[in-house]
Image (cartoon, rainbow, N blue to C red):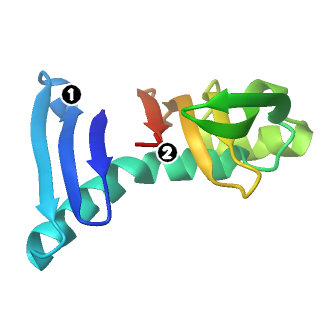
Amino acid sequence: MQEVDVTQQSIDGTATSNNGGNGDFTDKIHAKRADTDAWRIAVGSLNFGIGGLATGFALVNHSSATVREGAEKVNGYDTTKFTIDTSRGDAAAQVLYKNTLGPGGFEKGAVWVTSQGCPVKISLDDEIHGNDGSVTKDHYEEAMVKK
């Protein structure tokens, strides 16, 4: 889980992981834009956490698994809410999901998007079933807030 405030000049927050099942580990993320090395490391940390979310969202984006629910005001923005549920996917999408998420794997959640296509809030759960019988579960939440 990442809780981070990002501005043009600073990145401040924390990233918590379950450390491969060995208990939670929390790391601070902090950088000022003027410190190029710290900025690069902080952005890398954010990209690592967001990478799974981006992959998951790309999997269901513009597919039959995504349904437009309607207009909502979220975090001070006018948005359209879309729900995501891979179990709703058509036959072609189900083949893609099975190949990517494994048999029984899924993604479910919601995304709130401005009329310009900018995501304001995302909440996504995924479950990936490996060929070796392993199951990986992730929960992603991201939000953009007007300050």
Q: Nearer the viewer, residue 135 or 126?
A: 126
Residue in the foreground of this view, choosing between 54 and 117: 117
Viewer-proximal residue among 53 and 77: 77
Q: Element under label 2? A: helix
Binning the other alpha carbons within 10 Å of mark 2 as few (below 14), some (14 to 19) or many (20 upward) gives: many
Residue 123 is drawn in which quadrant?
top right
Rendered position, 110 above or below 101: above
Return the residue at label 2.
Answer: 53
Disc 1 crowd, CA 10 A, few/some/many (<14, 14-19, 20+): few
**Residue type at the position of mark 1:** Asn
Q: Residue at x 63, y 40 (%)?
A: 77
Contact check, label 2 and label 1, Cβ < 8 Å: no
Residue 147 spot, x, y in % from top left: 40, 42
Q: Earlier in the sequence, mark 2 or mark 1?
A: 1
The residue at 12%/53% (across/down) is: 30
Q: In the rendered image, which residue does mark 1 sit on?
A: 18
The residues tagged by marks 2 and 1 sit, at their Cα atoms, a distance apart of 17 Å
Compared with 118, 67 (above or below) is above
